[in-house]
Amino acid sequence: MFNPQLDRDGKLKHLLSIEGLPKAILNQILDTADSFAGVGEREVKKVPLLRGKTVCNIFFENSTRTRTTFEIAAKRLSADVINLNVGTSSQSKGETILDTVENLTAMHADMFVVRHAESGAAHLIARHVQPHVHVINAGDGRHAHPTQGLLDVYTIRRYKPDMHNLKVALVGDVLHSRVARSEIHALTTLGVPEVRVIAPKTLLPGFVERLGVQVYHDMRQGLKDVDVVMMLRLQNERMSGALLPSAQEYFKCFGLTPEKLALAKPDAIVMHPGPMNRGVEIDSAVADGHQSVILPQVTYGIAVRMAVMSILAGNS
Amino acid sequence: MTLPDAEELLLKLADGIKPIVTPYTALVGIHSGGVWLMERLLPMLGDLEHGTLDVSFYRDDFGSRGLHAETRPSQIPFEVNDRHILLIDDVFYTGRTIRAAMNELFDYGRPASISLAVLVNRGGRELPIAPQVCAADIPLPDDQNLQLERDENGRFSLKLERVDV
């Protein structure tokens, strides 16, 4: 089957989605990230791999953390980085996505990191770029956020190396979450035997169990004996219609408190892709507690993005 | 062609290194063969600081060959500034791996000096770099690949293969 992410030799050409990527490629990215993890702790936090290459961060939708970590990752690889907040420039003047990309290609960009509110935007760009240009999806609509999924499984692997013996629970707004989809595909591809989603029925997509997950609507049942709790942000800005009674009600049922976390294994880790809504999906006592690995996720996100960029650039 | 016994070469290499080692020397093995050699040399040379380098991120053929499929983390758990560093590798050929290793080391700090010890110098260097200690000179043509191997008991041997050039 044609996979737009892979070249004729089966090597990674673009990173658009975790879905459809072979386990060997995911493992190659995670293993390479291991090697990059130490670079940030050295006196010179740079390696020369992407020297002379130009990476364009095109963000049609706002983001601070993702754009910043992509920028740091590219700079630590010695690339030149251009950041474009397109929402505030050409697009508001009526330029199409492909015109924006063609203009940047004319400026000899080698890699595009794309975020867009519409699902499929990165895919569209990947189909139209010149053969030497690589595209990384930094989040498209409700579809995918593959580097977030990868950094999450990388974080899990750092703390719980035996992936074949884990119970992982994703809690919250799965319906609107591209992060959740990428996490689920990454976890199941890597052979995590039990992936659970815990959410009210209104925040779950139809037929979600077809992704290979077990569905729970009650935190007390769903969190029992899990090794990893991955909280999802309540996507207020995507919320349309009355899916929830109130944020307070949501916190009461689906917010992660120390009492609910106590149902998981004693050494369970707590993750969150950020930005957090404290007091809505997660209690501060948990977010700042000793089981939280939320800040290490950010640090590892740089190493994982360095790995993705250098593997792509090397497959030219 | 008969290849020398790699275990005997290891002893010869240790004898060659001993005179240049001081308490301020740190050993740095280059993956993979250089790390194997360093692990065997350490008990022979005494308690020295040591680390490992994987030069994948500093290679000069990234543009044509891409990233090595298996990279391992470099680990330099000591202060590099003002340290006398002895790089260890199995086979010295073009000198490009050592160039990459030196560039990487300088991203950890400014060493007082860097020396190089190798098991075999096979000739063919392309850069002004040469080993200070070398257990054997075995000149080889370009279509031959010489490699250090390690069996399940940890014993070393040398393997010669024909390659397409």
Image (cartoon, helix red, strand yellow):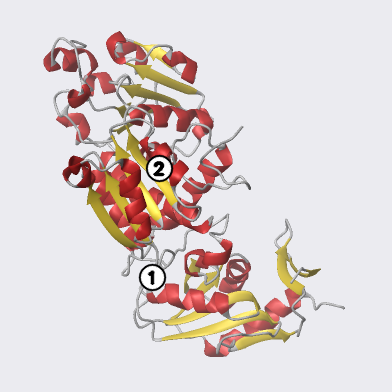
- Classify mark 2: residues with Cα within 10 Å, few (<14), some (14-19) or many (20+): many
Is residue A148 left or right of A4 when viewed as pictured?
Answer: left
Q: Position of residue A143 (x, y in %)?
A: 37, 29
Vertically, is A107 above or below B7?
above
Q: Is residue B109 above or below residue A7?
A: below
Chain ID of residue with mark 1: B
Q: Which residue is mark 2?
A: A125
Q: Is residue A300 visible?
A: no
Q: Is residue A221 left or right of residue A134?
A: left
Residue plotted at (20% across, 36% down): A275
Tell me which corner region of the image, top left, top right, bottom left or bottom right, holds residue A53. bottom left
Residue A202, image x and y in percent? 28, 10
Residue at 62% across / 66% down in the picture?
Answer: B36
- The image quadrant where one finds the C terminus of chain B is bottom right
Helix, strand, or loop for circle 2? Answer: helix
A273 with respect to B4 (left or right): left
The disc at residue B64 is none
Residue topped by disc 1: B78
A10 vs A180, nearest the viewer: A10
Q: Quadrant of the N terminus of chain B?
A: bottom right
Look at 27% across and 39% down and name the residue there: A294
Which of these two is toward me, A220 or A271? Answer: A271
> Which secondary structure lies at badge 1?
loop
Q: Is residue A67 visible?
A: yes
Q: Do the CB atoms of the residues marked 2 and 1 lie less than 8 Å apart?
A: no
How many numbered tags mark residues here?
2
Q: CA distance from mark 2 to mark 1?
A: 46 Å
* Name of the residue lying farthest toward the right: B1
**Amino acid bearing label 1:** Phe
Q: Residue at x 59, y 86 (%)?
A: B131
Q: Of circles 2 and 1, which is in front?
A: 2
